[in-house]
Image (spheres, helix red, strand yellow):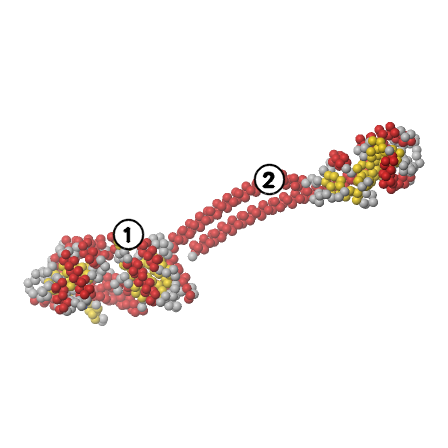
Amino acid sequence: MPYDRTIRTGRRFTLAALASVLATFVVTTALLAGFLIWTAVRIDEEALERQRSRVIHVVEALLEALPREQQSVAIWDDALLAIRNADQAWLDINVGQWGFSYYGHDESLIVLPDNTIAHAWISGVTRAGSELTRRAHALAPLLADLRERAGRGYADEPPYLADYVLLDGRPAIASVIPVVSDSGRLHDEAGTEPLLVSIVWLDLDLELRLMDQYLLEVGRFTATQSRPQLPILPVTNRSGRIVAFYEWLPYRPGEQLLSAAAPGLVIAVVIFGLVLLLMMRRLWLSSRDLEGRQREVERQASEDSLTGLPNRQSFEARFERLLEGGTSERPTALMMLDLDRFKQVNDTLGHNAGDALIAAVGQRLRSVCEDSSVLARLGGDEFAILHEKHDTPEDLLALAQRIIEAIGRPFSIDGVDAFVGVSIGIVMAGTDDRDRRELTRRADIALYEAKAAGRNRACFYEPSMDVAVQSRHTIEAELREALADDSQLWVAYQPLLGRDASTTIGAEALIRWTHPRLGYVSPANFVPVAEASGLIEALGQFVLRNACELGARWPGRLIAVNISPAQLRNPGFSDNLLDLLKQTGMRARDLEIEITEGILLDDESVAAAAIRRLRAAGVRIALDDFGTGYSSLNYLKRYPVDRIKIDRSFISQLPHSASSAAIVEAMVRLAHALGIMVTAEGVETPDQHGLLVRMGCDTFQGFLFSPPLAASEIASVFAAVPDAPARVA
Ligand code: C2E
Ligand code: CA
Ligand code: CA
């Protein structure tokens, strides 16, 4: 189905669109986040690199800074003199306290050439030199090195040496410089100068100073790495030994940037995501809406609105698909259903009732049909069932019977019981049957046969029916010619007798056709064809004119003429007939028209009006084939008729069938109770006649008395009784 495909394509398209929008959003967000993080990491890496080189620089710079600080004291005549004079007070103030308070030198020593400690200060406080002898030991290589350098001589500035050292296991910077004259007036032999040793511990004081002075990050010296995530730099001495580490809290501008920007970005992404979600929801809803509407359109296009069953188009499409499919799912039978007397319900109860009836019929059919079959309403009062299961003809017939029974039960419509029947045509599909139209045509033919056979029954298609259809076509063509020819058609009259059987009170006009090639053609064969083809108008007119001409010549004799439902449905019928009476001079009361229940049932309004009009003009009305319909007795009260003609099928059962006898007797009694005359037709034996007389029948017709006669012969019969007999009418 194209609709189906459209819906599926539409949904796939919507889903794809939604998915790509979502994917774009996710990818964009991820890329943005990735880029930001990458940038932050890069910035942090660069910052860290800069910090690392600054720490390296500071660690190196310290080894230069300490000697420079010492120089302010060590290159000074006064200091040299104070050492020579052992001026403790002067040295305390200008060396020990100054170095500690001004530069933060934790320990200061004056070491003599023999490596004895002349003066010592810890945190600016004088100590006994012996207390720090071990310093001289620990620093001996450094001191020796410096002395060796000084011993080589120097121009203006004395050499100095600073290094990272471990003293008593504590890391420190030790710096050593000779104490020399600044004026040059005092002199020591090179390499024998007293040495000023300054020690600065790598501790909090220094750390604070570094942060303050060199703007280093918050950090500290440590013997081992304490936290692996912190950057760390080894502090090595001159010989490459690690003395300590400097670890610090790195400044991470990238991270800072990220954490500053992140909340805003997250909010932006969330808002954007929400807006996107809302848009997608809108898109999704509207696409679903569209899909729903498409589905509805599809449903309406393929479904019959009254019954909810598939309609003709979708049924035919399904049928085609099944026929194209493999043998396993090939349809095995097609049933065509047509309601009987639906038109009557529609006309009497109105279109709404008709619709309700169709819907109810659809429901009953659905409840009877198996799931393996496709039930559809083709339109009007036509339904079809496609059987996909391999059913035997017996199964199909049983199903048809169930359907007929189900539909035969009264339908309660607006509180009124409505009765309809159903005729069914069935065709079995052979494995080679792939033509839907041909199968449908055959099912239609079978349906026509079912209707012709008396309705409310099922009929299987047989090839001979094609011949019947064929011959119907031939008959129609031939009849058309015969009507123009006027030598082939004539009217026979069957005498109508009174109670004592010697009085011919009238005759029934019966059409006769003597075909030049086919010979005698029965009206039972060609009248239905004439009715179906519309030729009945001309044919009926021919009979009526003939009958009226006869009736005009024999006033007082009742001439009965059969009128087809199709004739009565013509709104001009009554005018035409009254005209004909006038033209021929026949008295209206000598004419009786024979109608069947079908007229009353099928076309109430026009036909009923015509009947009322004719009756008012004096024409008599007879109900022909009485007892074969479904509601004969009911309608007697509603429609004014003068006579009923009990159908030959009842009479022929007499006198042996007790039930037929009971029925006939009841019909006679009822008719008489309503003031209606009764004719028994098809009387063939004296026994039948005797019984019917006893039952009270008023008039008789049948081969027992006379077959239908030519017009000249009936004239002789009439002439044999010159005075019109007292008519029993
Ligand atoms: P019908 O109206 O029931 O006509 C009576 C039929 O019963 C006639 O058959 C008649 O020949 C036959 N019949 C009469 N007595 C006996 C009997 O004792 N035994 C048997 N077995 N049959 C008897 P026919 O002439 O073949 O007509 C058949 C039907 O064709 C009629 O049935 C009527 O429905 C229709 N028909 C005949 N002529 C006309 C006509 O001019 N107009 C219309 N619309 N229908 C006609
Ligand atoms: Ca008749
Ligand atoms: Ca009849």
Query: Image check: 461 left or right of 620?
Result: right
Kind of residue at badge 1:
Ile
* Closer to the eye: label 2 or 1: 1
Nearest the eye: 163 or 520: 163
Looking at the picture, which amino acid does disc 2 mark? Pro
- Quadrant of the image containing the C terminus: bottom left
Any part of residue 432 in sight: yes
Q: Is residue 609 left or right of residue 236?
A: left
Could you say which quadrant of the image residue 245 lies in? top right
Q: Secondary structure at mark 2?
A: helix
Q: Quadrant of residue 676?
A: bottom left
Ranked by sequence position, the earlier of labels 2 and 1 is: 2
- Mark number, residue 263: 2
Task: Please tell me whether residue 32 is drawn above or below residue 337 in the rendered image.
Answer: above
CA gap, disc 2 and disc 1: 72 Å
Dot 1 falls on a residue whose secondary structure is strand
Numbered tag placed on residue 413 in the rendering: 1
Q: Nearer the viewer, residue 615 or 427?
A: 427
Looking at the picture, how far across and down is residue 269, in whole percent?
57, 42
Residue at 54% over, 48% down:
22
